[in-house]
Each structure stands twice: as C-alpha cells, then as structure tokens.
Amino acid sequence: MSFWDIVWFIVIFFAFATYLLVLFSIVADLFRDPQVSGGMKALWVVCLVFFTFITAIVYLIVRGRGMNERSTQKYADARQAQEDYVRSVAGASSTSAPEQIAKAKELLDAGTISADEFAALKAKALA
C-alpha cells in the first residue's frame, strides 16, 4: 500500500464519517420536529435511504434554519430543566438564615441536637 493510497483512504473515511454525522443529525431533527406528520417523516426517511446525497442536500437547504432553531430550543430546555432540578434539590438551603436558625433552635429545644450541633448549624446559616 503506497503513501497516496493511505491518504486517499483517510480522505474517503473522513467524507464517509462526515456524511454519517449529517445523516444522523437529519434523522434526529426529523423525529424531533412535532410539526412534521408521520407520513412526511416516513417519506423523508425513504428518500434518505434511496437517494441519500440529494435528499440530504435538499433537507439541509429546505429545513436547515429550522434544524438550528430546534437544536437551540432543545439545549435551552435541557439547561432550564437542569437549573430547575438544581433549585429543587437545593430547596432546603434556599430558606433564609433566620429561618434556618429558628429551625435549629426548635431542634435544640426539643433535645434532638446538642448545643454544639446548634452552634455549627447557626454558623453554617450565617456563612
């Protein structure tokens, strides 16, 4: 195998891998879009199977801007869900310092925690 055969193999492999990435992103975008009917999705997939390059180019030209918008919306929704989850998990620490100290005082008065534990909770609330 010569040097140029290896270079040619790398170029072909890169083009094929790039095409697969484009194809997978098209299929993912197609099934992510709720406005496209099931029949149209099936038609796009059939065309992608039998007329691969032409269909991919047409899809990117016709629906390329929408792909970007749906992708951006997907990531914004995921980020919002993550922020909501973090807020819900950190909900106990979202109370104010006086509320945390009052709860710790109630626990101290009930005998659930010791004075040292109360002092630690108070210091943590004030920090």
Image (cartoon, helix red, strand yellow):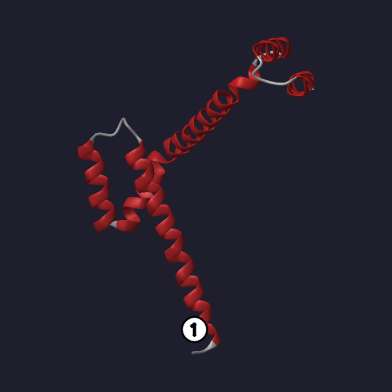
Eyeballing the image, is 110 above or below 87?
above
The one nearer the camera, 61 or 69, is: 69
118 shown above or below 9? above
Residue lying at 22% horizontally and 37% vertically, measured from the top left: 38
**What x and y, as percent, mark residue 73?**
48, 31
* Residue 40 occupies quadrant: top left
> From what the image shows, is residue 63 above or below residue 125?
below
- Left or right position of 73 against 104: left
In the rendered image, the residue lying farthest to the bottom is 1
Amino acid bearing label 1: Asp
Q: In terms of depth relative to the viewer, which is nearer, 76 or 111?
A: 111
Residue of label 1: 5
The answer to which quarter of the image holds residue 110 is top right
Residue at image location 38% in from the left, 53% down from the top? 23
> Most extreme residue toward the left, as rendered?
39
Q: Quadrant of the C terminus?
A: top right
Is residue 80 found left or right of 21 in the rendered image?
right
Residue drawn at the location 20% of the way across and 39% of the way down: 39
Q: Answer with left or right where residue 104 lies relative to residue 92.
A: right
Q: Position of residue 115 (x, y in %)?
A: 76, 19
